[in-house]
Amino acid sequence: MRKLSLENINKLFAAVAEDKTLYLPVDQSDGSAKYSKWAEGTVWSNALNTVRSPKDLFFPQTEDLMEFKTEGKNIEVIDIRKESEDFVIFGVRACDVKSFEVLDRVFLSEPVDSYYASRREHAVIVSLACSRPSETCFCTTFGIDAINPEGDVSAWKTATDIYFKANTEKGEEFLASIEALTEESDDTAVNEQKAKTADIMKKLPLADLTTDSFGGGKTEELWNNPVWDEFSQTCLGCGTCTFVCPTCQCYDIKDFDTGNGVIRYRCWDSCMYSEFTRMAHGNNRLTQKERFRQRFMHKLVYYPENNGGLFSCVGCGRCLSKCPISMNIAKVMRKIGGDK
Amino acid sequence: MQKITRDQLITKAVELLSNGTVSAVLGWQKGEFDYDITPAVFTTEEEIKNNFVYNDFCGANFSKYLVAKTKKLEGKILVFLKPCDTYSFNQLLTEHRFDREKVYAVAIGCEGMADVVKLKNKVDGIISIDYKDDAMYVDTLYDGTVKVDYADVLAERCINCKSKKCVAYDELMGEDGEVIDSARFDEVARLEAMTPDERFAFWQNELSRCIRCNACRDACPACTCEKCVFDNPNSGVENKAPANSFEEQMFHIIRAYHVAGRCTDCGECSRVCPQNIPLHLLNRKFIKDINECYGEYQAGAEVGSRAPLVDYTEGDLEPGEVFERGDNNA
Amino acid sequence: MNMREDTLIPKVGVITDVRIDTPDIKTFRVVTPDGKKAFDHRPGQCAMLSIPGVGEAMFSITSSPTNTEYMEFSIKKCGCVTEWLHQAEVGQQLTIRGPYGNPFPVDDVFAGKNMLFIAGGVGLAPLRSVINYCRHYRDRYGDIDIVYGSRSKDDLLDYKEIIEEWSNDAGVKVHLTIDNPQEGWNGHVGFVPNYVKELNFDTNKTAVLCGPPIMIKFTLEGLCSMGFDKTQIYTTLELRMKCGVGKCGRCNVGSKYVCKDGPVFRCDELDELPDEY
């Protein structure tokens, strides 16, 4: 395990940023944190997590896919893809690290999405263990260990120091690149902190939330549950939950005529939107109830059915904080699973 | 803290439901942590007694729900309206957006609602909240019980409350208040005093956080178009994500134009924004301009009033004057 | 650039023939600019066609894989992409990518079977590929019955091919019907599901259905009441699609993605999906 005094954290950032672009949570003017590019003077946020998840860095809200030039009846397809630059995402929480696995299974399954894959291959993930989880956290429900986060490198922050441990080859390389700044250390302080956090994790209000009622093969059983009617009644049909969600990955592909050629781009889309499934001659999900059900069934039943039981919720709690009507997956799970 | 209590509202709801005045109740449903309250439609006494709550986090404006909820309704729906909600209620009636006969409106006095973002910025790990006369006492994961003054977490729209007067109801609970000479335009004036570059930078910073989730539009009681231009693939502006950095700003500016003269300044847009963008300032700018150009006008103060932007009087400002005014502002 | 190929990036295709089939259906012949078939496919598979700036949409490939020269798409005018295509002329380029989706099991399950094809309106388009495949390898299949109906005689797709080629094949019976009586029409009049019941087919067949949802629903009921088992009946679905490879999420129904796990489904498999297609 390598150790660095937090007093020198900016030296570490500067060293990393010398040959790789470095992203880390930074406070914005409204007080919330956002993954931002580090530059001299950038201050690492103390926030538990960002409003937007780090999925942005692999699957941005909007990205150009290709260009077309048209002349008369002729069309030219222009491949505008560029290999991603090398970059480091620093301070990713355990829930968000797990979300990359959820996204990988979609984008890296055949046929591989080259846009996502390029960024994924060029990224080093430095995760950060949680020490002050919020009441909205429920990663343990999905078997995620907030105090032992995955990633290329795992990090633990105490009051005075930060400790690093490599988990992958990329992680070893990363630690080697900052070796001069860090010193070898035992894990006493880290273990102390882990024990403290583990106690808190048990006391979290959602600690008793389980996935027992969910998983592959539950479609028929859950399809007509009254929860869909009841809980979708006041759903606004906005896209907040899907856009702050680290695992939501539905997208739209659209063309934009620049006047000097056409750019085909993709952007995040939301199954909560009324036109998501609308075709020229019909819509297979006509009401908000059906759209609401789709989102939760996808995360809790369909996705695990296709991915060996892995749920596509990581319990990060973003939707719990951000839904305009405070409706969320935890309430749905609680209602279906029975009250505590 | 609210003077009207949960028990009073439950008694009222149960009374109106059981005597057949209404067949459904639009109210607030309890959440996991006291502050995460969901609007809900209650149809039984049991549901109301078990799940109905009312506290300082019941900020949601129910007026807009009436458009959808009255459509296929048998009988009437009971809606609880805080003073600012009654303005939205009137404005929707002015625009013939729902059938007044299908609604039983109970107006309730309001002491101002808390902003959960402000609370969370002060307190970590909220387990539960006890509302006492002097302050809210927050039971936390890390710091035991924390005393939080109501004033310290009061929502911006409540700090700058424009009216505690209930302008529409079938029944009033608690005391009616007065229209308040608030300082709500001060922040707009501060922005007006900026140079165009400063103002552009201000909005660029704020709007750069927009994720185009449409929560502002979907919560806005003035946004009740059956088919929004931004959802219409044939409109040419149907984009979910900003195609360039300017576009996200256009979305909000276009929306502000669409609701100009109809926005009651209820503040739902800013409340629901997951990125804390002060969207209400755009609308307030319009309200301030309308007041200055055409005389004081409050949308929703009464049913059927003609807003200055859809009315013509001989004394109206000449287009040239508006142009010059814009020039001076630039 | 050393990036791998990406399925989202299409090839250029060129329209080399436009046939007017019905008042609202045209059939487009498409090849690459150097005159070749854009890619190989199996019967029932689809392709994404697009006009840059207008949009991209999924269409079933109407021509049989046994046609090695070009692909054909029979397209009904119903949205912005199809409207644009309908005003396109020969020589117009478009973009094409695919093939997408699973094909009909023509080489295993269908082999040796008596085939019953039932289509309504533009629903013949996806079946034409498999019908012509079965005709090409005629000796691999038993009897072939084709029931096809449309609003009127003018709305029957591929009419010339049906009359001049299909009807003349040995062991192929074509049963045409139109919804309402029409001058110059001596054939059957009535809706497809009723006609299927009247024809009272032996259940020793494998059925393939395609048409409007209402036609599929009643035809399926009719076949089941005749004694067909749902495992003998195949159909093909259509939902909104963007990526074509089970990632964008639009055509997700239950744990299936229609673009990837479909569009061809056996009817008993459909029963396992939630009723949302």
Image (cartoon, rainbow, N blue to C red):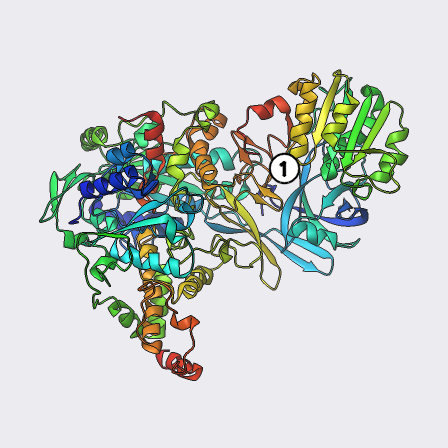
On the image, which quarter does residue A170 sit in? top left
- Is residue A29 shown to the viewer in this render? no
SS class, disc 1:
loop
**Residue B314 horizontal side relative to residue A76, left or right:** left
Residue A253 percent location from the top left of the image: 56, 48
Q: Which residue is mark 1?
A: C238
Chain ID of residue with mark 1:
C
Residue drawn at 74 percent across, 38 percent down: C121
Camera-nearest residue between C7 and B96:
B96
The answer to whether any part of residue C156 appears in the image is: yes
Q: Position of residue B259 (x, y in %)?
A: 40, 63
Amino acid type at mark 1: Glu
* Quadrant in which residue A135 is drawn: top left
Task: Give left or right: position of A84 versus A163.
Answer: right
User: Where is the N terminus of chain A found, in terms of image quarters?
Assistant: top left
Please say if A307 is above or below C49.
above
Left or right for B215, reference C156: left
